[in-house]
Amino acid sequence: MTDPAPGPLRARRVTRRALLERWWLLPVAGTVGTFGYMGWYATRVTLSKRTPGEPAFESAPAQRVAALADLGADWAEVTFTYAGRPCTLLRLPAATRGSLAVPGGHLAGFSRVCTHLGCNVNLVRDAEVLAFAFNYRAPGGQEHPQLGCRCHYSVFDPLKAGEAVFGKALAPLPRVRLEVRGADVWATGIEPAPEYTG
């Protein structure tokens, strides 16, 4: 007795035996896809980080942030809210793009909103905490405090104008424009918030 199905339909019919002979394709395809995605993502978060350029401040109402006397030592910090965003003011031992020179040092202000998904960043002073908790150690032994996000462990370097140097964040932290008026430090502008890079 002949098969009632026409020739083209017979060729398209998939038997259980044919499926069982090729079952191994599913886990192989899943593994290749997973490792392909992981490779793409690792390349993206390693090689796609944006370097801060010259500041692009947007004006905002002037606000007193701190007394200059409160920032007498390197890595002194004052946190504040400006233009609706949590920010930090740091005294740095060296100049960086967007910093303000003051007698004996430099001041820099940054938004504390992580550019990955919007969590708050905090100043991490201990290099061993950065190494253990964030899995980051500055290259070349240049260990100094960094701004770290505890949500997904991105690290931003204040001495590189807030550049994202490690983790999932790609964009640098927005900078705050600072002025010294008499004995006080004032914020007078801030860079726009970038789109999150999650």
Image: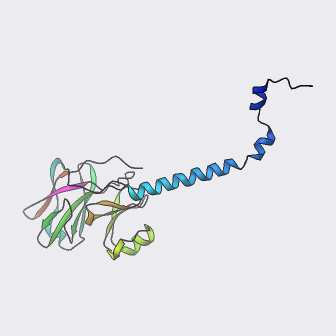
Main SS of the magenta part reads strand
Residue 155, how many percent across, how many down? Answer: 36, 63
Residue 196, how many percent across, how many down? Answer: 37, 48
Residue 128, how many percent across, how many down? Answer: 40, 75
Q: Residue at x 67, y 47 (%)?
A: 26
Q: In which quarter of the image is the N terminus?
A: top right
Query: As rendered, which of 56 and 114 lies closer to the eye?
Result: 56
Query: As rendered, which of 62 and 178 lies closer to the eye?
Result: 178
How many numbered markers are drawn? 0
Give the residue at the far right of this rendering. Answer: 1
Tell whether position 177 is magenta: yes
Q: Please report the bounds of the magenta region as a residue range.
A: 175-180
Residue 163, how many percent across, how many down? Answer: 30, 60
Give the residue at the far left of this rendering. Answer: 182
Query: As rendered, which of 158 and 81 lies closer to the eye?
Result: 158
Q: Which residue is drawn at 25% across and 47% down?
A: 192
Q: Residue at x 44, y 68 (%)?
A: 135
Q: Is residue 83 above or below residue 2?
A: below
